[in-house]
Image (cartoon, grey):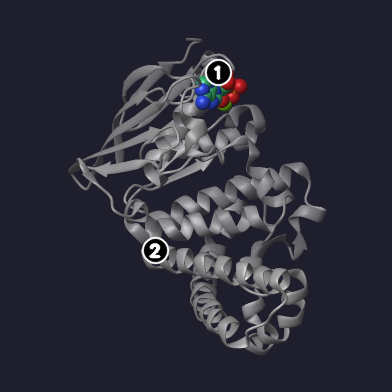
Amino acid sequence: MLLKELYLLNFKNYTEKNWLFSPKLNLIVGENGTGKTNLLDAVYFLCLSKSAFGSTDQNLIRHGEMQSVLRGFFEKKGENFEIACGLQAGKTKILKCNKQTYSKIADHIGKFICVLIHPYDTDLIREGSEIRRKFFDQMICQVDSVYLEHLVSYNHVLKQRNSLLKQFAERHFFDQTLLEQYDSQVMELGKLIFEKRQFFVQKFVPEVLKQYQYIAESKESAHIEYESDWQEANWKINFTQARQKDLALQRTTVGVHKDDYAFQLDGFSVDKFGSQGQQKSFVIALKLAQFALMQRLTQEQPILLLDDIFDKLDANRIGKMIQMIENQCFGQVFVTDAQPQRSLDFFEKIEEKAIFETAVL
Ligand SMILES: Nc1ncnc2c1ncn2[C@@H]1O[C@H](COP(=O)(O)OP(=O)(O)OP(=O)(O)O)[C@@H](O)[C@H]1O
Ligand SMILES: [Mg+2]
């Protein structure tokens, strides 16, 4: 899977620009604030139809402009695809594949897969459960379109149930039949999501273990414990028994939207007991495992986006990553660095590469 060419118009700090990429290594170098990360975000956006950094579609439009265009020319299994997205102030985005507008943007997810490694990845360890659910959801969605459908439906029903709970409180009434309609859907969809997450984690854990031992040169056992209300034998009863609490709090307190993934080294929480180095190794292992598993499940090499990794990693881990790139463990790779000479030195041995310089516009 390759991104051969990219065209951006009024995307973040870019006015209008075109890039022809190498199928192997692409180095994006330039001073701070010149648009290196923004370029990776554009690639990510064309794959996942949203920003990697939580920007709303509207915030991606260059300040002072009314619309933005992203156009990518991809190659997959010898076939060419043109993915184009139009963003317009105050309107919803339009996404096209080979000039055909998607009726459902979700249909695009999984067509072109990518993995991003960036400096804030350690948030995955330190922050609350939401960021971990997002990480796993995004990964599973890219390889399983049915999962994405379940997730969209679940979130929709959950929103409806929560708004009904609010209405009960605001209007001082209660309709059990109405609530039970949502309850059964939340439980049914929740079970399907739980089963998929459980299945996926089982496949993911051995990859994380392997990648951690490689990247950290360590024998420690990296593990992920999936934690879900749905694991309890009597999850249905628990869900129903939480009704009083749900009514009081006006939101659904039990379900897969509360799931978490506990990251562990030798059985201890990486968050509570891991050193900074162990935490950094763990997140890189997560991302490398993501790459390996997505490749295995889709028979395609995801596009690898490495944002600013040289500033945040120590020499050993940098050496390992460079070794992997040299050994062609990945397909197309994009690397950003604010120090051009450093990257050129690191990738001296790689002949098939393109270098792009970002500059203040
Ligand atoms: N919607 C937007 N319109 C105009 N400029 C924007 C928009 N969104 C972000 N920017 C600008 O993009 C610039 C940041 O670009 P980016 O994060 O890609 O820089 P970078 O080269 O990765 O920097 P660093 O080396 O510090 O990581 C900032 O100056 C920011 O103000
Ligand atoms: Mg950056």
Quarter residue 75 falls in:
top left
Indicate the secondary structure of the residue bearing disc 1: helix
Q: Residue extending furthest left?
A: 79
- Quadrant of the picture in which ligand 2 is shown: top right
Amino acid type, residue under disc 1 in the picture: Arg
Distance from mark 2 CB to nearest ligand 2 atom below 8 Å: no
Q: Is residue 91 visible?
A: yes
The image shows residue 313 at horizontal and vertical percentages of 65, 33
Marks 1/2: CA distance?
39 Å
The image shows residue 284 at horizontal and vertical percentages of 59, 45
Crowding near pointer 2: few (<14 within 10 Å), some, many (20+)?
Answer: some
Query: Image check: 295 left or right of 2?
Result: right
Residue at image mark 2: 144
Q: Nearer the viewer, residue 176 or 140?
A: 176
Which residue is drawn at the image coordinates 63% and 52% (left, top)?
Answer: 131
Look at discs 1 and 2 and give the one toward the viewer.
Answer: 2
Indicate the secondary structure of the residue bearing disc 2: loop
Q: Nearer the viewer, residue 225 or 161?
A: 161
Which residue is drawn at the image coordinates 50% and 65% (left, top)?
Answer: 156
Check if mark 1's residue and mark 2's residue have beta carbons within 8 Å: no
Q: Earlier in the sequence, mark 1 or mark 2?
A: 2
Amino acid type, residue under disc 2 in the picture: Asp
Residue at image mark 1: 342
Q: Is residue 60 above or below residue 165?
A: above
Query: Image check: 212 left or right of 358?
Result: right
Q: Quadrant of the N terminus?
A: top left
Q: Nearer the viewer, residue 329 or 21?
A: 21
